[in-house]
Image (cartoon, rainbow, N blue to C red):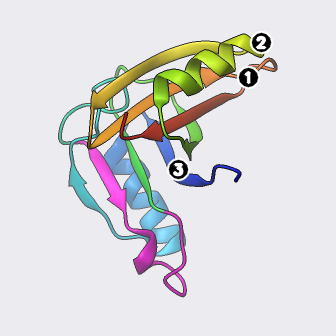
Amino acid sequence: MAQPVVHFEIIGNDPAKLRDYYSELFGWEYQVGDAVSRNVSQPGMYGFVDGSTTGEGTGLNGGIGGGPDHQPRVLFYVGVPDVETALQKAESLGGTRRMGPDGIPGALVVGHFTDPEGNLIGVAGTA
């Protein structure tokens, strides 16, 4: 079975401004708190978007965060059984690990890699 996209992120230098922008643009509402990793967003600056509250309740979960020292980017996360295994496979196929695994094993672990063309992709799982 193929692995699904489970989360999106929009990261920038001014997360509050980005949240306001996307709230006005798309009507998104946020629960602001901490991301799973400081590499993703500064503490207290990550706005979670619950996909069940968007559109017909079938939207994708996501988040908007970052901070002054974070590189602006948009990425998506693919759900995987084991983040380390997924990162190793990405590397073996010509990708480059950029972050991770990082997080809380058993709850949420994330990693980032770039594909052979340089696109940043996330993987997320409980291990």
Q: Which residues are magenta?
A: 45-60
Q: Identify residue for label 1.
A: 115
Please give the label number shown on residue 94.
2
**Up-down: is 42 above or below 125?**
above
Which residue is rendered at x = 46% and y = 17% of the image? 99
Residue, disc 3: 8
Helix, strand, or loop for circle 3? strand
Furthest toward the right, the residue is 117
Mark toward the viewer: 1 or 2: 2
Q: Quadrant of the C terminus?
A: top left
Mark 3 / mark 2, whichever is N-terminal: 3
Contact between marks 1 and 2 (CB within 8 A): the answer is: yes
Report, in whole angstroms, how far the alpha carbon at label 3 lies from the one at label 1: 17 Å
Q: Are marks 3 and 2 in contact (CB under 8 Å)?
A: no
Q: Earlier in the sequence, mark 3 or mark 1?
A: 3
Tell me the distance, in whole angstroms, between the alpha carbons under discs 1 and 2.
7 Å
Q: Nearer the viewer, residue 9 or 19?
A: 9
Amino acid type shown at disc 2: Gly
In this rendering, the answer to whether 19 lies above or below 58 is above
Pick the front one: 55 or 58? 58
